Image (tube, grey):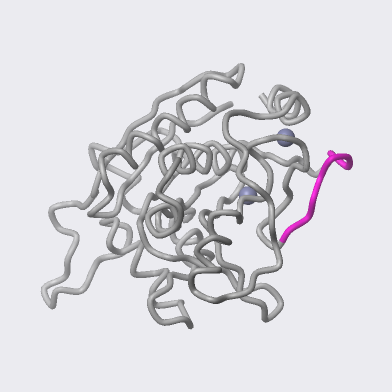
Amino acid sequence: MIKPVRIMDQEGIYELERKAVMDGIYSVLMLTAAGSNGLVNLYDWKTEEHKNADGSLKPHQSVDWYIEQGRIASERKGLLNASALLSALSERAPRDKGSHHSWKKKPYEILVHHEEIYIEVNGETIFLNGLAASGEAAVISTYASRHGEKKDACQNIRSLAMHEMGHILGLIPNERIENVKYTPAGRHCVNECVMQSHTSFVQQKADFLGRVLGQEEKVIYGTFCPTCMQDLENIF
Ligand SMILES: [Zn+2]
Ligand SMILES: [Zn+2]
C-alpha cells in the first residue's frame, strides 16, 4: 500500500525548484497503479515550539533540525552528510503524534535543500544529488543544478525527484538481476531510464571544483524504462 508523501523545503528553495520536485513526485505517483494517497508540501516547516530556551533546535520539530543532523555528522566543511540526514528523516518522529500534520501512518518523507551532500563508503567520499531509503524517505539537493549547467536545471531536478521517489517505492528490487548496476548509492538501472545512476550533474560540478569522481552517466530525462515500470507494477 502506498503511503502519503510529505515534502519539506529548506528555507531558500526557489519556487521553480519546488515545482520541479512536486511535478516529478506527482508524475511517479500517477504512474503507479496505487496512485497518490496524498501529497503535501510543508515548505520551510517548523512547529511553534521548535527551539529550546537556549535557542537550540528540538528534534523533529523543524526542517532546520534535519539539516543540522547532516551538518553535525559531516566531516567535510560546508557539506552535509546525506546518510545522517536521511536517517534522521526516516525515524518515527514525535511530530507524527498529535500535531495537525499527523497521519495514521508515517508518510514518505522528502526533504529538499540546496546544500552539497555526500556519503562515505569504504573510506571513499561520494558526492550526490540525492539519497533515498526504500519505504521511508529521501533527500534531494538542488545544489548541483544551481552550480552546474543552468540549462535544463528544472528538468534535472524533476528527474532527480522521480529517481528518488522510485527508490522510495522500492526500485531497483533485489530480485532483479538484469540491467542492474551496483553503485555506492544503491542499485541502479542501466537502461535509458530515470533510474540510472545520477551523478552526471555532480560531475559537471566536480570538474568545476577540480575533483575526480569515478562515475560518468548522462542525465536521462523523462520516465522509467519498461523494466522499471514492470518492477513498479509488481511492487504495487
Ligand atoms: Zn539513485
Ligand atoms: Zn529503468
| Residue 174 in the image, given as x and y percentages of width and height | 80, 44
As drawn, is 56 to the left or to the right of 160? left
Front one among 52 and 118: 118
Q: Is residue 153 above or below residue 86?
A: above
For the point 45% across and 40% down, the residue is 152
**Residue 97, image quadrant:** top left
In magenta segment, residue 49: no
| Residue 116 in the image, given as x and y percentages of width and height | 43, 65
As drawn, is 236 to the left or to the right of 19? right
| Residue 102 in the image, given as x and y percentages of width and height | 32, 38
As drawn, is 109 to the left or to the right of 181? left
Q: Is residue 172 above or below residue 59?
A: above
Task: Name the quadrant of the C terminus.
Answer: top right
**Residue 222, image quadrant:** top right
Q: Is residue 170 above or below residue 123?
A: above
Q: How many numbered marks have been drawn onto this rendered protein structure? A: 0
For the point 69% across and 57% down, the residue is 216
Front one among 25 and 170: 25
Q: Which residues are magenta?
A: 176-183
For the point 60% across and 21% down, the residue is 32
| Residue 192 in the image, given as x and y percentages of width and height | 72, 35
For the point 81% across and 45% down, the residue is 180
